[in-house]
Amino acid sequence: MITRGLEAATKGMMSLLKQEDVNANNLANVNTVGFKKTNITFKDLMQADVEVKQVPITNNPKDTQFIRVGSLSLGNAADRTYIDFSQGGLITTGNKLDVGIQGKGFFKIRHQEVPDNVPYDEKNYYYTRAGNFQMTDDYYLVTKEGDWVMDTQNRRIRIVLNPEDENNNPNNRIDSLKDLNIGENGVIQITNPDTPRTLQQIQIVDFDDKTLLSAQLGEGKFIQEEGIDAGMHQSNQSARLQQGMLESSNTNTIYEMINTITVTRSYEAMAKIVKTQGDTVSKAINLGTVNR
């Protein structure tokens, strides 16, 4: 019975360390565009029945009964972590290449080292809500890390008058800061009245079961792990893109800081319990040694 309290307090401390890691990661990404915070759940590891002794009317010890009045948790542990995909606030930037998603869905991104002629492989792609895009020297739309933004045909997006023309002909270029429009459905258009044209459409995808997505890449990037089908489908009609805006992290800074303080205090309390229980065990061992 002495060690049970020590075990419960130790497991509680381990759970608190896990929660502190989650809180720290959320706070570290509070300024990461499109970041989705992680939450953690706990489970009871041990349950003990609480009983009361009922004194028999006959005063016969054989008639004594114990009545169950409830249960008592003797320890818990981190059960699982899950990603909160709730909408983050949209912040106006005015940058023509910044795109925020209002509603459900993700941008589909291909790693920059993967060339066009490689057959489709899911491991070459990831999904993100971060729409802080840039333009390469040859006018391809990429993420801040240089990864390719995909259109609805799984092609790289090139913002010029004629995307098929690979030459950087000055007559093929547009003034992206003035003549570029990205519609709510992701369709890219040139608005210059002298050269009006509809170009490619940014691909937005969603998943039937987002709990199957992995955030192992970090920085608000999600993947489908090998052998797992989360039910990916295009969702350009259900999401609305907002040009000149970015989605902020959905992390609540004040909540995470309060949670961190609470976890720290709880950990300190558990540490005192462990010390007290440890001292008790030591005394019991010493007492047993003396009585030999």
Image (cartoon, helix red, strand yellow):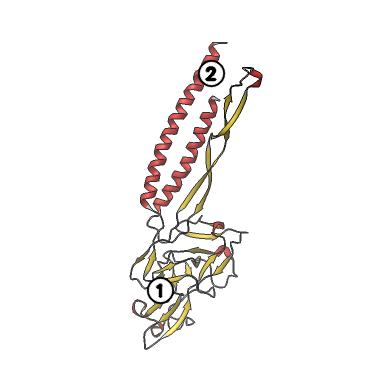
On the picture, is 62 further left or further right than 77? Answer: right
- Relative to residue 258, is residue 37 depicted above or below? below
Q: How many marks?
A: 2
The image position of residue 116, as x and y in percent, is 54, 72
Tell me the residue at 60%/29% (across/down).
Answer: 67
C-alpha separation, residue under disc 2 versus residue under disc 1: 74 Å
Disc ID at residue 54: none
Disc ID at residue 285: 2
Asked if one can make out residue 135 in the rendered structure from this viewpoint, the answer is: no
The numbered mark, 2 or 1, whose residue comes first in the sequence reads: 1
The image position of residue 191, as x and y in percent, is 38, 83
- Count residues near mark 1 (Cα–Cα under 10 Å), then give few for <14, some for 14-19, many for 20+: few
Q: Are marks 2 and 1 in contact (CB under 8 Å)?
A: no
The image position of residue 1, as x and y in percent, is 56, 25
Q: Tell me which amino acid carries mark 1.
A: Asp
Q: Nearer the viewer, residue 43 or 68?
A: 68
Q: Nearer the viewer, residue 114 or 30?
A: 30
The image position of residue 284, as x and y in percent, is 52, 18
Q: Nearer the viewer, residue 69 or 81?
A: 69
Tell me the residue at 53%/18% (across/down).
Answer: 285
- Relative to residue 92, is residue 172 depicted above or below? below
Furthest residue in direction bottom, as rendered:
194
Mark 1 sits on what residue? 137
Which element type, helix, strand or loop, lies under badge 2? helix
Tell me the residue at 55%/15% (across/down).
Answer: 288
Q: Quadrant of residue 49?
A: top right
Asked if one can make out residue 5 in the rendered structure from this viewpoint, the answer is: yes
- Quarter of the image with the C terminus is top right
